[in-house]
Amino acid sequence: MDGNAARKWEQAYTSYIPKKEEQTSTVTVKQKRWITKGEKVLYSAIGFLLIAACIYVVSFASATDTLNRKVESLEQSIQQQKVTNEGLLYEKKQLSRPERITRIAKENGLKIQESKVKQAQAYNSN
């Protein structure tokens, strides 16, 4: 081939090359998610369980506190009743003294033998 034929062929080849049209296509790129759906479900379930456990612990602590307050109030009322009982027991002993009984009997005009009064005192101490 001589030089002219090569040039004609080059010009002819370049003139027949179809021009590429720019194709505009939208490519949707899927972004990789940070957390998958399965992980979201798993984390949600764990979070729900933790919240439920916290609520249970708080309610249990509240119930325990209420019960402790009731126990303390009952113990306080028991102590008050013990003090009252001791006071009444002391008063009973004071009222059942033989000297007092004979004094009241004499004021009302009764005659009591001393031996029977002392026996009554023996029965009251039991």
Image (cartoon, helix red, strand yellow):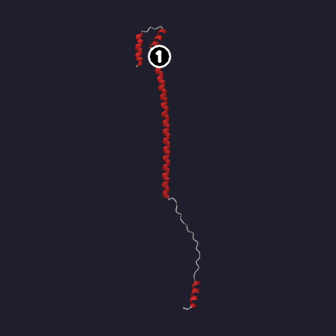
Q: Position of residue 89 (x, y in %)?
A: 46, 21
Name the residue that disc number 1 marks: 95
Q: Quadrant of the C terminus?
A: top left
Residue 27 sits in quarter = bottom right
Q: Who's the residue at 50% across and 32% down the image? A: 73
Question: Type of residue at label 1?
Answer: Leu
Give the image location of residue 83, x and y in percent: 48, 25
What residue is at 50 percent from the left and 51 percent from the top?
Answer: 47
Q: Is residue 18 above or below residue 3?
A: above
Mark 1 lies on a secondary structure that is: helix
Q: Position of residue 49 (x, y in %)?
A: 48, 49
Q: Residue furthest bottom?
A: 2
For the point 40% across and 17% down, the residue is 123
Q: In the rendered image, which quarter contains the N terminus?
A: bottom right
Question: In this picture, is 3 found above or below 59?
Answer: below
Quarter residue 21 falls in: bottom right
User: Where residue 55 sits: x, y (%)?
Assistant: 50, 45
The number of callouts visible is 1
Mark 1 Cα shell of 10 Å, populated few (<14), some (14-19), many (≥20):
few
Q: Could you tell me which residue is drawn at 48 percent across and 26 percent down?
A: 81
